[in-house]
Image: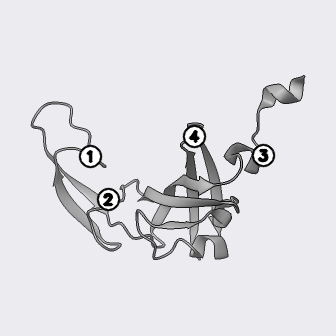
Amino acid sequence: MAEFKVVIADPESGETFQREIDGQDANRFLGREIGDEIGGDAVGLSDHTIAITGGSDETGRPMREDVSGTRLKELLLEGGVGFDPSRDGERKRITVRGREIDDDVAQINVSVVDGEGDVAAAFGEGDDDADEE
């Protein structure tokens, strides 16, 4: 059975939230690709739409949008997802995962693209200063 850690980014506030999902909620992500938009109810955001922006497998290999399927592939990278060069002209062969989500993916990164209401309030992580007054 699929089990994922989902990192939800809220571009309006700049905050991120983490949720562990499994079962039917995790199955909604299987077979989806980077860039796909789905309903946020799988992560507890029923009034929002989220877009898959990336992820990584259990060994930390990043998913790349330019690699099809779920396979592993070695790429000679000059920069971008999976490699940050330390000097000009540096290249390195890196193993990356394809853009499609399967059981080997451990973490999925998503971003809120549309919806009504506050994302932090939906997760129960509202403004703590308001509670102290």
Contact, mark 2 vs mark 4 (Cβ under 8 Å): no
Q: Is residue 107 visible?
A: no
Please tell me how crowded label 1 is: few (under 14), some (14-19), or many (20+) other residues with Cα within 10 Å: few
On the image, numbered disc 3 is attached to which residue?
124
Please tell me how crowded label 4 is: few (under 14), some (14-19), or many (20+) other residues with Cα within 10 Å: few
On the image, numbered disc 1 is attached to which residue?
80
Amino acid marked by disc 3: Gly
Q: Point out the frontmost of discs 2 and 4.
A: 4
| Residue at x 64%, y 71% (from the top left corner) | 25
Find numbered disc 3 in the image and state the secondary structure of the residue it sits on.
loop
Q: Tell me which label, 4 or 3, sits earlier in the chain.
A: 4
In the rendered image, residue 24, in percent from the top left (x then y), is placed at: 65, 76
Q: Point out the frontmost of discs 4 and 1.
A: 4
Q: In the drawing, what numbered circle is on residue 12?
A: 4
Find numbered disc 4 in the image and state the secondary structure of the residue it sits on.
loop
Q: Tell me which label, 4 or 1, sits earlier in the chain.
A: 4
In the rendered image, residue 33, in percent from the top left (x then y), is placed at: 41, 69
Residue 73, by quadrant, is bottom left
Position of the N terminus by quadrant: bottom right
Task: Tell me the distance, in whole angstroms, between the alpha carbons under discs 2 and 1.
Answer: 9 Å
Find numbered disc 1 in the image and state the secondary structure of the residue it sits on.
loop
Task: Tell me the distance, in whole angstroms, between the alpha carbons under discs 4 and 1.
Answer: 24 Å
In the rendered image, residue 15, in percent from the top left (x then y), is placed at: 59, 38
In the displayed orientation, state which residue is furthest to the top: 133
In the rendered image, residue 53, in percent from the top left (x then y), is placed at: 44, 56
Q: In the drawing, what numbered circle is on residue 64?
A: 2
Task: Tell me the distance, in whole angstroms, between the alpha carbons under discs 2 and 4.
Answer: 25 Å
Amino acid marked by disc 2: Arg
